[in-house]
Image (cartoon, grey):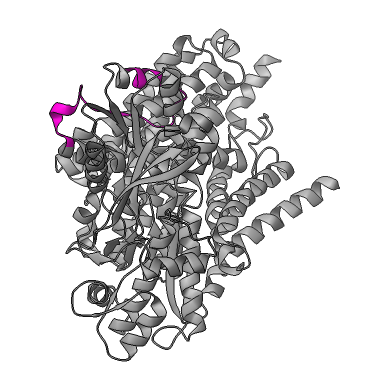
Amino acid sequence: MSAYLISMATFVGFFMILALALNLQWGMTGMVNFGIAGFYALGAYTSGLLSVKLGWPVGITIAMSCVTGLIAGGLVALLSMRLREDYLAIVTLGFGEIVRLIALNEDQITEGPRGLKIDARPFADMFDRETYPLVYLGLVAAAVAVVFVIVECIRRSPMGRTLRAIREDDVVAEVLGKNVLRHRVQVFALGGAFMGLAGALYAHYVQNISPEVFMPMVAIFIWMSVIVGGAGNNWGLLLGAGVVMTILEGSRFMGDFIDFLDAEQLSAIRIIVIGVLLIAILRVRPRGLIPEPKFSFATSTTQQERQPSTENAK
Amino acid sequence: MTRKITRRSALITGGAIAAAGVFAPNIARAADPINVGSLTPNTGGGGPFGPKITSAHKRVVELVNSQGGVLGTTINLFQENSETNPETAVRAADKLINVNKVVGILGTWSSSVTLGIMPKCQEAGVIQMCTSSSADIPVRDEKGYVFNFQALSPVWGRAIARLALRRGFKTFNLMALNNDFTRSMMDGFTEVVGKDKLLQDSFYYNGGQSSYRSEVTQLIEKNPEAVFIPSYVTDFTSVYKEIFRQGYEGQVISVSISTGAKFKEAIGDAANGIIHGLPVPPIKSPAYAEYVTETGLEPTDGVQHPFGTAGRDQMSVLLLAIEKSGSTDADKVSKAIWDITTGDGKETVYNVTDGLKAIRAGKEINYSGASSSVEFDKEGMVLGRDFQLAEIKDGKDVVIERLEF
């Protein structure tokens, strides 16, 4: 049992990194990204291919995944230069599909639909088979912590306020002298890097990746995590990722108790239950489990340093 | 006031979900029987087949339990849905392996799912039994724990090609859905008909498109006598509509999994004339007759439940092998699987009841199943499945030819 919980916690970790990245892009900056699966795949395949085909050490390949995610994110954001937000949604959805189709069709490189088998795992030699899953969970947890600290620092910083301004009204932000495009590209690239990191960690964990893994459904799970947790609030979506995974996986245990239904009915009911629970959560908590705190000077973390400027304003 | 209550109830709901996730498995683990996992595609691309496989698993387990189980203990069956998706299947397999402590995971259908869960199964020492056709399965099975009850897809391609040649077609064009199963089938087909009979290079198409217009145009451009399209039902329906719309008059050949009831319903009369083939149960075998009775199907001369029959054989073979080896250790069980399925001069049994009796009487057995005679090669791949080519006439499949082994 504990092995199962460790494994699920590891999967929650991947979800958390992706959700934190999406929150940075959408929750804070208002940039819609439906191409999460594409960045995830890019990270997974970058790290997987570099270690399988070129034999690079895992530490370096994982870092390279962040770099490719960073570059891809930046380029996709540049496309948004002349596009309104809803068009960005379509561009990112297209990006996700393009990555998946390249992985599917360039089979000389990616092994195509057969899937890529990855043997390399970080620190695998140093631990035995029993403790290794725990080590990997620790690694993923550390990655979550690092990503969390970075996005939380951004949220509290002046940059975080600028991002929220862009989210609420980019014209106003621009009028106030903020470089909207630069911020958008930075945020999207950074989010892409985090998604690449999650992909790399996923690839070395499951050790077998194929294009079918990176269907747009992955993006939907992450969107659910962010929406259920509370968009804009990093703590909330850590909880959101946990809740979504608990609903997805916890509903499996239904079948072990209900024996009057056959497997086909159970499968259908399980998927209905997942939908109903998510609707129920959003019905009682429309802004998510832990909503983003409303911005006000009284509760602002930078209250003290702000004090003089408010006086000046008077 | 209302708001407070809502918040509280939300917390309670959340807590209950979390508690269910944490405590449920402990309750499930309380008993100490032999645990077996069934991981079938009950929804998604394999949706028409998964439920039949898993209900066959369940019938065998219930039968054996009613007769006292194996090794003196009952069998506990855990059924999970792979959703025909390797991403979900890995987590379902994780639950079966780590929570339910299963001896084997039976019934995976799509090759990507079988391959996707393989690293976890190999590491944990769990037997896999599947009906997947990817030629990569034996290559990646390093420990000899994987037993495949389906012919590998090059075999499908070769068999369909031989039957097509016998029908007298001289020129062909091929396009295949871009997945491992259908791609290697295309290679097998080309190998038999010879490259010179193809009017142009074969190509792959990507599934899930809203239109296949350009692909179909390319396929029939040079007007070959026959086209072969290895595919899944989801995409073949759209592909075939396009072929019909463009007025192709040659012969369309595909695989039977693409031309089932759902396809015929969607296409109607236009489906008449399509030729399709797939590996089939040996319909003269006593095991197949028993399967038909067990499922309450009307006996016909056509083939029913090509995958459900494999489900019956998977579970029967696993339970017989556990009894034979006297253990649930993967190495011992996998060795016993060869003992009870393959080799001459043994007593042939057609069901698990007779098999268990014979093993307990100290006899050597060779299980012959409802899906095939269940003989494995050194890599655990099934040998010699019957193969059948059928034509759709008046909305029904009419058997043209059957290759028997």
Q: Is residue B259 above or below residue A304?
A: below
Residue B130: x and y, percent?
34, 58
**B31 with respect to B7 (left or right):** left
Task: Report the number of numbered marks.
Answer: 0
Q: Is residue A258 above or below residue A77?
A: below
Question: Can residue A67 be seen at all in this image of the molecule?
Answer: no
Residue at 48%, 64% in the rendered image:
B292
Query: In the picture, which quadrant includes the N terminus of chain A?
Result: bottom left
Q: Quadrant of residue B183?
A: top left
Identify the magenta region. B193-217
Residue at 58%, 20% in the rendered image:
A165
Residue B379: x and y, percent?
19, 61
Residue A267: x and y, percent?
56, 54
Q: Is residue B292 above or below residue B236?
A: below
Residue at 38%, 32% in the rendered image:
A39
Magenta region includes residue B198: yes
Magenta region includes residue A128: no
Front one among A8 and B101 = B101
Residue A111: x and y, percent?
23, 39
Question: Can residue A176 be seen at all in this image of the molecule?
Answer: yes
Residue at 41%, 71% in the rendered image:
B101
Query: In the picture, which quadrant includes the C terminus of chain A?
Result: top right
Front one among B161 and A80 = B161
Residue placed furthest toward the right: B1
Front one among B207 and B122 = B207
**B85 with respect to A288 (left or right):** left
